[in-house]
Image (tube, helix red, strand yellow):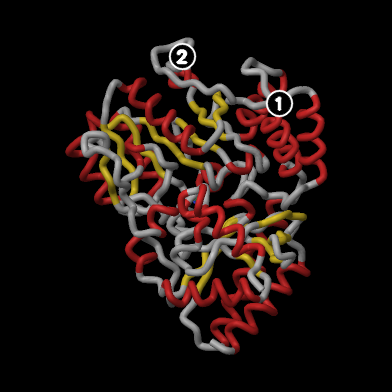
Amino acid sequence: MTSRNHQLFELSQKYIPGGVNSPVRAFKSVGGEPIFFQRGQGAYVWDVDGKAYIDYVGSWGPLILGHAQTEVINAVQTAAQNGLTFGAPTEAELKIAELICQLIPSIEQVRLVSSGTEAGMSAIRLARGYTGRSHIIKFEGCYHGHDDALLVKAGSGALTFGHPSSAGVPAETVGHTIVLDYNDRAGLEKTFVEHGDKIAAVIVEPIAGNMNLIMPESGFLATLRELCTQHGSVLIFDEVMTGFRVGLSCAQGLYQIKPDLTTLGKVIGGGMPMAAFGGRRDIMQCLAPLGPVYQAGTLSGNPVAVAAGLATLKQVQAVGFYERLASKTQQLTEGIVAIAKKQGVAFCAQSVGGMFGLYFREKIPASFSEVMECDKDAFNRFFHAMLNEGVYFAPSAFEAGFVSSAHGDMEIDKTLVAAEKVFDTW
Ligand SMILES: N[C@H](C=O)CCC(=O)O
């Protein structure tokens, strides 16, 4: 009998390109058909054929409290009853803006948008408007949404499908984008010596999560900070993924580096489409209607999304929240590593807060080129075998994984039992 999933996928391909609304969902690199989900609760998701999975994707990061979390759902329902959108200021958006500024000291003012792509694109335009310069630096394998200027040697779905620089982006559009290697301080210094007075901004994922998980090496972020200050360039931390995911003070708090601008998304929307960019007041004041840099959005600050975000940010402030999350995530990665090692599989893993990376190689990668050395076929085999056991990891060797506060000992144990079974017959 044909599964409901298969039927839906067949039909979807007729009406939606590739049957998906974002390429990385397509299972293209791991093979097989994408799963159509019907519902989620806590740490679990159920597909349309009724099979349950422990979910380590969490909608690619936003669901730090798990699926359908009671307070978040209640907040959404209450907000929705008062109207879905006004296209005008609300008290709730003021509340979330104030909270973001309180929790992230580098953010003195913030503007809400609807997606991480918008946040990144707006931050770049703002940095260019503020400095009056054109060049930007980004790093290979980092992904900042699908804004044209940033879609060069990008990570995430672009990397997954082997097209890190997209067709449809004119050469002139990326003519001002300089791409460097993540963690390459010497390359960075050289570029600033050559082009320092032209560089409007450096945009970086302070912990890279779109080429699997790559941690910044000691001194990398500090060098970035020093060079940007020295040359009058705007330092932009893309914390769409790491914001309120790796800790309450985000990656910038962990590394004690103050960027000029920060982009946020995922967790701040609690599962609803919301993102933000914010930072130094003197830079933010260049935005319309105060300044000459235009930026806008009909649904920006959407009240339902803001309600979900506020309910989420309230809960992550609970004492010990991030310590518990980090320890669960570590329990998961250390457990899988121990099982793989027992079977002699070349595998390693690492985590930070509620975010983790799994690598089919002996040593944890520290750069884009080392990530590329991971055994992609082994990952694909592992992915499908775990899926078969009811564990859903991201369908790409280049994406980080996520643990939520709804993942308890039971879910971690079940995952490790599944991994034991998978590696037993490796
Ligand atoms: N890595 C991406 C976002 O952070 C994955 C989500 C997507 O592209 O659909």
Secondary structure state at the residue bearing disc 2? loop
Relative to 321, does residue 257 appear above or below in the rendering? above
Report the disc number at residue 84: 1
Residue placed at 34% from the left, 52% from the top? 164
Relative to 273, does residue 53 appear above or below in the rendering? below
Residue placed at 55% from the left, 31% from the top? 276
Q: Position of residue 282 (x, y in %)?
A: 45, 18
Residue lying furthest left in this view?
194
Q: Give the residue type that dot 2 points to.
A: Ala
Relative to 420, does residue 292 appear above or below in the rendering? above
Residue 25 at least partly seen: yes
Along the line of sight, the residue nearer the viewer: 223 or 151: 151
Is 12 placed left or right of 233 in the picture? right
Marks 2 and 1 in Cβ contact (< 8 Å): no
- Mark 2 or 1, closer to the camera: 1
Residue 356 at least partly seen: no
Estimate how packed mark 2 is, as few (under 14), some (14 to 19) or many (20 or more) residues with alpha carbons within 10 Å: few
Q: Quadrant of residue 80?
A: top right
Closer to the N terminus: mark 2 or mark 1?
A: 1
Residue placed at 43% from the left, 42% from the top? 144
Q: Give the residue type that dot 1 points to.
A: Leu
Residue placed at 65% from the left, 25% from the top? 98
Report the disc number at residue 288: 2
Along the line of sight, the residue nearer the viewer: 300 or 97: 300
Is the distance from the Cβ of mark 2 to the nearest ligand 1 atom less than 8 Å?
A: no
Is 317 placed left or right of 2 in the picture? right
Report the disc number at residue 292: none
Q: Position of residue 134 (x, y in %)?
A: 26, 28
The Cα atoms of the two marked residues, 2 and 1, are separated by: 25 Å
Q: Position of residue 331 (x, y in %)?
A: 66, 69
Q: Position of residue 418 (x, y in %)?
A: 67, 78
Is 114 placed left or right of 47 in the picture? left
